[in-house]
Image (spheres, grey):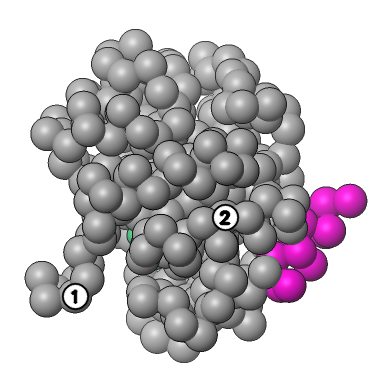
Amino acid sequence: MEELKLIKEFENFFIGNIEVGKDFFIIAGPCAVESEESLLETAKKVKEAGANMLRGGAFKPRTTPYSFQGLEEEGLKILSKAREETGLPIVTEVMSKQDIPLIRKYTNVFQVGTRNMYNYSMLKALGKEKKPVLLKRAFTATMEEWLGSAEYIMKEGNKKVILCERGVRSFDNYTRNLLDLMAIPIIKKETNLPIIVDPSHGTGRKDLVFPASKAALALESDGLIIEAHHKPDEALTDKKQTISIEELKKIVNLKK
Ligand code: PEP
Ligand code: MN
């Protein structure tokens, strides 16, 4: 990976009071923003549990066009209301280059999902933004492809990149994806970039979110992004992997 230079030149930056690159942080919240009432309730509880940022998709990349696609701008407005009420910075997904100006108005961090890691025109456009980018690994990506995508963003000037290991596709559907935890020491060796772990999409199973988080911590992950809901059994999307607030507290306490 000799030609990739910028991934070695990362410098710490702040999101709220978190110094990325130094402080361990937890991003938690529902898979999707479902309604104002539901998101505000989850946000309040996620904050009480001790998470540092709030996640929630307003634009959802779904496998079929018939599934819930997200509340779009209404969802973004709900997220910013939750930020006003809790003080938690927001992390939300951007799926296309033309949505960047809209999402920029509301979010603190642009999330690039697994399906868009190879969306080079969007990555270049995000490279011109000032806000940080959470770059999820494509479920088919080699390390080199993933780091190439990070370099695309950084080359345009935006050095605030955070990598996220979220599992790769494997031959066995016992778990939704195969969480490649060795990505943590590999990324730390090859780059100076921060790397966090998504134990929710990485396993697809709520019973595995805790052990996967514990393992990520042991390997010195810079953070976690977790799907949590105040009523996990009623979550509209990714219910099987969404944990309760109680379970989230257990994970927050791992760090103490
Ligand atoms: C998500 O975090 O909401 C998501 C869709 O994740 P991924 O892109 O990793 O599937
Ligand atoms: Mn999800």
Which of the 4 image quarters holds residue 208? bottom right
Q: Position of residue 101 (x, y in %)?
A: 21, 27
Q: Is residue 234 left or right of residue 251?
A: left
Question: Identity of the amino acid at label 2?
Answer: Ala
Q: Position of residue 94 (x, y in %)?
A: 27, 42
Image depth: mark 2 or mark 1 in front: 2
Q: Is residue 78 above or below residue 8?
A: below
Residue 255 in magenta stretch: yes
Q: Are marks 2 and 1 in contact (CB under 8 Å)?
A: no
Q: Position of residue 36 (x, y in %)?
A: 41, 58
Specify whether tag 2 is near ligand 1 (CB below 8 Å).
Answer: no
Residue 251 versus residue 213: which sits nearer the camera? Answer: 251
Span colored in magenta: 246-256
Q: Residue at x 25, y 57 (%)?
A: 71
Q: Residue at x 52, y 74 (%)?
A: 242
Question: Identity of the amino acid at label 1?
Answer: Ser
Residue 117 versus residue 103: which sits nearer the camera? Answer: 103
| Secondary structure under the numbered disc 1 in the rendered image | loop
Neighbour class for label 1 at 10 Å: few (<14), some, many (≥20)? Answer: few
Quadrant that contains the N terminus: top left
User: Which secondary structure type mostly characterizes the magenta part of the structure?
Assistant: helix
Residue 222 versus residue 48: which sits nearer the camera? Answer: 48
Residue 254 in magenta stretch: yes
Which residue in the structure is indicated by mark 2? 43
What is the count of numbered marks? Answer: 2
Q: Residue at x 12, y 34 (%)?
A: 98
| Residue 36 visible to an observer of this rendering | yes
Q: Is residue 248 above or below residue 224?
A: below
Specify whether tag 1 is near ligand 2 (CB below 8 Å).
Answer: no
Q: Which mark is residue 67?
A: 1
